[in-house]
Image (spheres, helix red, strand yellow):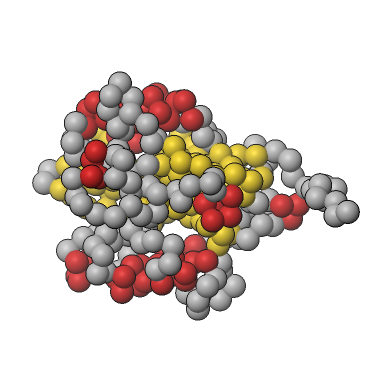
Amino acid sequence: MTNLRPKKGTIETHLKVLTWNVWWRFGPWEERGEAIATTLAGIDADMIALQEVWDHEGADFAAELAAKLGFHHVYENCMDVGDVGFGNAILSRWPINITDHTTLFGKAETGETRIVIYAEIDGPRGKIPLFNTHINWMYEQSHIRQKQVKDIARFIDSKPKLKFPPILCGDFNASPGAEEIRMLNGLTTAPVEGLAFHDAWDFAGGPTAGMTWDNTNPYVARYFESDRRIDCIFVGLPKTKGAGYIVGCQLAGNQPVNDVYPSDHFAVLAELRY
């Protein structure tokens, strides 16, 4: 009979990481903001990657959430919508040692600026490299997204190699079978040789399809689009003693709070050996 117990010395402690597109200041954004904060407090993830974060007149939503949670954070604006900023953020229970970001391909072609941000997080059992992005959204822009994924991969490869594998979170606006996703999962030519990721949902998701753009959400239903799984947590191949091994993945933020859905996207929450 096969012994399925973890090998001796395997890491048994875990961390939780969440990714969520919080839909900027669209819809009833003030009520949604409260729902987002309530949801995050209930989930109690260790690290949170947010997309479509707003900033305005020196204030940003990431800072507000971090203050409520007692977390550290980094926020980077990538473009403005009117006079309000639109960007990505990382929130962390543990200190953030180093941050960086880079602009991705596509501004000249689409009129939109997209970025990837990096945080080296000083966790209690070693440093964690976390990346967060939000790439172009239109169905017909796979060719743009493929070039953006190449930029992301090169940016990840430029960072110091740590004892924990890189975590890449984001809204990728592409379903798992798309070429831009296959490039990350080792299913086609990798943008950077030797750099490949496990998709947390594919690896350890629940019995459902894990749709994050889902017509059960009233904010989605009005667009007459199909359900899709476009928000992902990718984790580099596990390191010594199973560091980074994905032990679970589930949807979050998929229930209304006081009759208000927090966002048009559902969140993804993964648990990793750490």
Question: What residue sits 34% from the left and 36% below the top?
Answer: 62
Horizontally, is 256 left or right of 14 in the view? left
The extreme bottom residue here reads 189
Figure disc tally: 0
Say whether residue 78 is visible. Answer: yes
Query: Which x, y percent locates residue 225?
Result: 24, 54
**Is 177 above or below relative to 88?**
below
**Is 62 above or below relative to 206?**
above
The quadrant holding residue 149 is bottom left
The extreme right residue here reads 1
**Is 104 above or below relative to 228?**
below
The extreme top residue here reads 258
Query: Which x, y percent locates residue 247?
Result: 64, 46
Question: What residue sits 47% from the left and 74% below the top?
Answer: 191
Quadrant of the drawing holding the N terminus: bottom right
Horizontally, is 176 left or right of 270 in the view? left
Quadrant of the drawing holding the C terminus: top right
**Foreground pick, 118 / 42:** 42
Question: What residue sits 39% from the left and 35% below the top?
Answer: 253
Question: What residue sits 53% from the left and 36% below the top?
Answer: 46
The quadrant holding residue 151 is bottom left
**Foreground pick, 214 / 132:** 214
Horizontally, is 244 left or right of 168 in the view? right
Say whether residue 99 is visible. Answer: no
**Foreground pick, 116 / 26:** 26
The quadrant holding residue 104 is bottom left
Query: Which x, y percent locates residue 242?
Result: 71, 52
Query: Which x, y percent locates residue 261?
Result: 29, 32
